[in-house]
Image: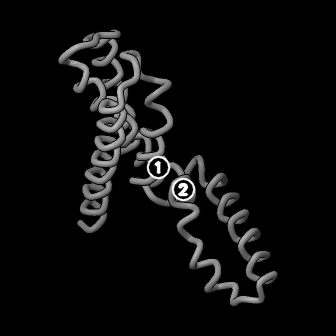
Amino acid sequence: MIVKTLLLLCLVLVIVEVLFFPGITGPITPIADVLYGTQYGIIGFTYVCILTQPGQILSGWRDWLEWQYTLFFTQKALEKKQNVADYLASYRWVLKPILTCELCVSGQLGLWLYPFCSKIGYSFSGHLAAICSGILTAYLLAYLWSHKKQN
């Protein structure tokens, strides 16, 4: 249910963008940049918190990345003759930008997709606005998601 709602919201944002901001430059540009960021936040949250969870469509991708992570860092720990569990825990941050942190994934989407997806043309302030609004959107969705789970 929530996936359908988020996808519908993303579709509405795309329609609003296409109808009202088709290549416009000028004072309305920041609104379009924030819309881009909102889409990145919705996509990042949906990917991390829903689609890669056990039993979902991308759970195999998550399992494969976790396996690769464990395999690689276990080898490194054994080469350095260190405790494997401690070594794995100290490098857990490696998975955040691609798998385990909705804020990180949304920020990465904003960082890498904005220059290619912006019909308005590149601007640094627009790029920054898209990244920040994407992270903020993901944060708000994660907060609402955790609050919903508690109730």
Q: Nearer the viewer, residue 104 or 121?
A: 121
Q: Nearer the viewer, residue 3 or 37?
A: 37
Specify few, some or many for label 1: CA neighbours under 10 Å numbering under 14, 14-19, or 20 or more. Answer: many
Q: Secondary structure at mark 1?
A: helix
* Residue 86 drawn at (x, y percent): 61, 86
Asked whether residue 5 is in view, the answer is: no
Question: Viewer-proximal residue, 127 or 72?
Answer: 127
Q: Quadrant of the C terminus?
A: bottom left
Q: Residue at the spot x=28%, y=23% of the render?
A: 32
Q: Is residue 70 left or right of residue 49?
A: right
Q: Nearer the viewer, residue 148 or 35?
A: 35
In three-dimensional space, the C-alpha distance between marks 2 and 1, rounded to whole angstroms, equals 7 Å
Asked if labels 1 and 2 touch by Cβ distance under 8 angstroms, the answer is: yes
Residue linked to disc 2 = 99
Q: Earlier in the sequence, mark 2 or mark 1?
A: 2
Q: Is residue 3 left or right of residue 62?
A: left
Along the horizontal axis of the image, is 80 left or right of 19? right
Q: Residue at x 77, y 89 (%)?
A: 81
Residue 61 position in % (x across, y down): 65, 52
Q: Hey, which residue is sitting farthest left in the picture?
A: 27
* Three-letter code, disc 1: Val
Task: Give the residue pinned by disc 1.
Answer: 105
Q: Amino acid at mark 2?
A: Leu
